[in-house]
């Protein structure tokens, strides 16, 4: 696995900042937001096994009956996987704010 920090080119600085970030992680409040791009059925099972405070997996196909953490982005229904949702729309808002109620999710509703 490779993690990039494009805002910093000094290797020692990056390592120090990464260590600081790791110490601040509250493992009891981990929130996972992912999508179905490139996933297999075994990946869904692996995601299911990850303990997290909140987790959601955006999908193009509605598989929420099989996996309660899945949420279909209907904009991508009929496609093999979700498209872009983490970018700016023409009106300046983040795309996902129009596709998914993230406030409710953060407040405890996985849908």
Image (tube, rainbow, N blue to C red):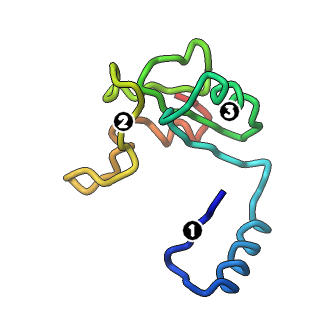
Q: Quadrant of the N terminus?
A: bottom right
Q: Residues within 10 Å of mark 2 (few under 14, many from 20)?
A: few
Which residue is tagged 1? 4
Which residue is tagged 2? 99
Is 29 left or right of 5, judged from the image as shown? right
Q: Mark 2 and 3 residues: CB-CB less than 8 Å, in contact?
A: no
Residue 2: % across, % down? 63, 61
Q: State the residue at coordinates (40%, 29%).
A: 73
Residue 29: % across, % down? 73, 49
Label 2 element class: helix
Is 11 left or right of 100, judged from the image as shown? right
Which residue is tagged 3? 47
Nearer-the-camera pick, 46 or 109? 46
Nearer-the-camera pick, 111 or 17? 17
Which mark's residue is nearer the viewer, 1 or 2?
Answer: 1
What's the CA distance linking mark 3 and mark 1? 23 Å
Residue 53: % across, % down? 71, 41
Label 3 element class: helix
Sequence-wise first label, 3 or 1:
1
Is 67 left or right of 73, judged from the image as shown? right
Residue 65: % across, % down? 57, 12
Up-down relation of residue 47 to residue 79 (above or below): below
Up-down relation of residue 20 to residue 98 (above or below): below
What's the CA distance linking mark 1 and mark 2? 28 Å
Sequence-wise first label, 2 or 3:
3
Q: Which image quarter: residue 41?
A: top right
Sequence-wise first label, 1 or 2:
1
Which mark's residue is nearer the viewer, 3 or 1?
Answer: 1
Q: Which image quarter: residue 14?
A: bottom right
């Amino acid at each position: 696995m490779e993690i990039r920090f494009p805002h910093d080119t000094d290797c020692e600085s990056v390592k120090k900042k990464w260590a600081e970030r790791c110490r601040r992680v509250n493992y009891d409040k981990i929130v996972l937001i992912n999508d179905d791009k490139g996933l297999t059925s075994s990946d869904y099972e692996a995601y299911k096994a990850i303990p997290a405070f909140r987790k959601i997996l955006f999908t193009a196909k509605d598989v929420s009956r099989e996996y309660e953490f899945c949420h279909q982005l209907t904009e991508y229904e009929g496609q093999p996987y979700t498209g872009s949702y983490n970018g700016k729309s023409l009106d300046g808002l983040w795309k996902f704010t129009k596709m998914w109620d993230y406030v409710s999710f953060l407040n405890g509703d996985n849908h």
